[in-house]
Amino acid sequence: MNEVIKAMEERRSIRRFRPELPEKKDIGQILEAGLFAASGRGRQAGIAIAVTDRAMRDRIAEANRKIGGWDEGFDPFYGAPAIIIVLADRACRTYVYDGSLMLGNMMLAAHTLGLGSVWIHRAREEFELPEFRQLLKDLGIEGDYEGIGHLALGYPDGEAPAPAPRRDGRVFFIE
């Protein structure tokens, strides 16, 4: 079977992570995979921020928890020691799709490197908050960026979940 298709079929969302941080070179390869995602008209509207600093990761997790309405102490990143935040330039008509494709590429890359990942929402709401708008400015990121999603990233703690059966009736041909 083709290696890419095999990775697509085997990749699962991981919701339990070991505490050790993935190697920087692996995070770099995952980011690179995101940069090579397809984008509308080749405009490459998406950007990625890798967060490996524990204090910043926890600050973002806490904001995400509050937005999601979970009880204090809940970690919406499931203990993942790293997160990659994808944002995209609202000036591009395809910005949401471009950022989504980046996340998809990065999830596949993480899987092929033996890492686990899960897409976590609420990045849009987080990056509407003044403290995270300021973070973008502090990083030198200028423009009107919207948060698309987070990639919680780390070494899986346990076995990957079994795949859900694929629903029938989702493919059609016009021949």
Image (cartoon, rainbow, N blue to C red):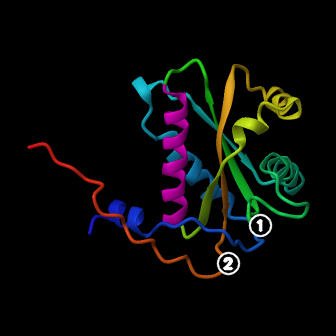
In what element is the residue under mark 1? loop
Mark 2 and 1 residues: CB-CB less than 8 Å, in contact? yes
Residue 25, percent across and down? Answer: 63, 57
* Residue depicted at 86% across the width and 57% down the height: 54
Q: Can you name the residue that lies furthest to the left here?
A: 175
Residue 21, percent across and down? Answer: 74, 65
Which label's residue is closer to the chain start, 2 or 1? 1
The secondary structure that most of the magenta stretch takes on is helix
Question: Mark 1 is on which residue type?
Answer: Gly
Question: Mark 2 is on which residue type?
Answer: Asp
Residue 102, percent across and down? Answer: 52, 43
Compared with 35, 160 (above or below) is: below
Q: Which residue is mark 2?
A: 157
Q: Residues within 10 Å of mark 1 (few under 14, many from 20)?
A: some
Compared with 65, 39 (above or below) is: above
171 vs 92, left or right, is left
Q: Can you name the residue that lies furthest to the front here?
A: 169
Give me the C-alpha separation between circle 2 and circle 1.
10 Å
Q: Which residue is mark 1?
A: 79
Quarter of the N terminus within the rendering: bottom left
Residue 93 or residue 140, whichever sits in front = 93
* First to last magenta residue range: 94-112
